[in-house]
Amino acid sequence: MSQLPVLPLLSLLVGAVLALLAGVWRAWAGQAISVVVTGLSLVFGAVGLVVVVRDGPLTYDFGGWPPPIGIEYVLDPLSAFMVTIVALIGLLVCIYPVDAAFGLQPERGTPLYPLVLLVLTGLTGVMLSGDLFHLFVMIEIYALATYGLVSLGGDRGVLAALRYLLLGTVGSGLYLLGVGFLYFSTGTLNMADMAASLPPIADNPAVLGAMGLIVIGLSLKMALFPLHVWLPDAHSAAPPGVAALLAAVQVKAAAYALVRILFDVLGPAYLDTGGLPVSTALVWFGLAGIIVGSWLAIRQTDLKRMLAYSTVAQLGYIGVGIGLASPIALIGALLHVLNHALMKSGLFLVAGGIIQQTGLKKIPRFTGLGKQMPWTMAGFAIMALSMVGIPPLAGFWSKFYLVWGALEVGNWVVAVVVSTSSLLTLVYFVRLFEQIFVREPVEAVVLEAEEPGPRIVGTVGVLALAIIAVGLFNAVLVSQVLGPVATRMLG
């Protein structure tokens, strides 16, 4: 068990090297290796989650050097929960056919899967890291690999990757500068050691400045409104599989880091203190993101761009849950990390299946797809209804906990906005339902469409069933994992 905290990451990192070498020999071999190693990472993450919930956190010191000198990996219920989500979405994206997920012919996908595995390696490293500088290194690993994957989207993808590179570098720089201030103030980079050193210097301007820099840097990485400007182009221009990774797990890594640093390192006492209203800012910017993101999604006619702006709105829920800083609201935010990962990855992968089968991207041309692709569109309907917040699907419960948390702290504005935001989500999905399930097909290319292959239908089906399962059994997840995490962080 002593090696368990590092195994999910090592399997992905070794797999990235093997996938590159094997892909040179046979194009299909790179994808096969990526499926195997992401499956291993999922097993390690799921086993780790069971173990740490039962027995408590596990740590691993690299090279036998204990902290604060060495780098420490920490596997606790929160990090194991996040690692499992990353591995699950990564596995399903790797299983998806390369032409539907990435817009490439299989023989041209040789360098693709090593980049995907590097993204997953960096994300997993963020979840497991117990060192603030090592966390920065892992952020850069997944970011650099992501820039290459986004650029696969043609000329638009290259421009989107360039914008993401520029803004992502700003976010990383702000985070690193904040970490530097914390290091100079405490003399350590280890999260646990730093958390023990910070209470006596709570009013130190350097610490407060560091908190502001880190929150802004990670909010930019998370694409929290109004720092979301890189996200719509990156997600809509990137191939569907890349967009699924970005929307489902990549932006959540920054949200996880924000939760970990605010509540485990700095502590809730730092929120809204010293003239730095971090909690209030996260709540109000999150609410603005919910409204503006939904409104912009309604205006879109391109499916992937609509889903991209929808992600801005969904990230607003997570920001609100973090900002409310109450155990119930944090449960809602963390549960929405999982729910949105399942819903949005599935929706982007469905978009990839539609593009592969029909070549269509514009919503007004989707007439009749419900009859031509019934199983795929059934999965799409479950994901969309969950996004709206229809009970008992998964998306309802995260909003339920957010409203409950808002009422608990007396924030009626949050309760009203989160409750009524489902109507905005319903508006942009109703247009799709009308085109897909009500209108008769008028496009010849749609009339020739067939149900996609078993890998597409199977992947979409797994995500749809997972959404139903999380909705029906969310109480188990909350009581065993998320509830204890939120109580430990916020009391």
Image: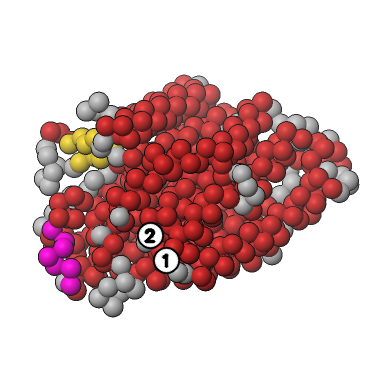
Quarter of the image where one finds residue 428? bottom right
The amino acid at mark 1 is Val
**Disc assigned to residue 326:** 2
Q: Quadrant of the N terminus?
A: top left
Identified at 30% across, 59% down, the residue is 262
Q: How is the image coloured?
A: secondary structure
Q: Does the residue at mark 1 contact the one at mark 2 (Cβ under 8 Å)?
A: yes
Quarter of the image where one finds residue 43? top left
- Residue 192: percent from left, percent from top: 19, 50
Q: Which residues are magenta?
A: 197-203
Q: Is residue 289 visible?
A: no
Q: Is residue 273 visible?
A: yes
Identified at 76% across, 40% down, the residue is 358
Identified at 45% across, 24% down, the residue is 36
Q: Is residue 143 magenta?
A: no
Mark 1–mark 2 Cα distance, whole angstroms, equals: 8 Å
Vertical position of residue 6 compared to residue 201: above or below: above
User: Quick one: SS at disc 2?
Assistant: loop
- Residue 407: percent from left, percent from top: 48, 64
- Residue 14: percent from left, percent from top: 34, 28
**Disc assigned to residue 409:** 1
Q: Is residue 201 magenta?
A: yes
Nearest the eye: 28 or 231: 231
Residue 81 falls left or right of residue 431: left
The amino acid at mark 2 is Ser
User: Quick one: SS at disc 1?
Assistant: loop
Vertical position of residue 454 compared to residue 484: above or below: above
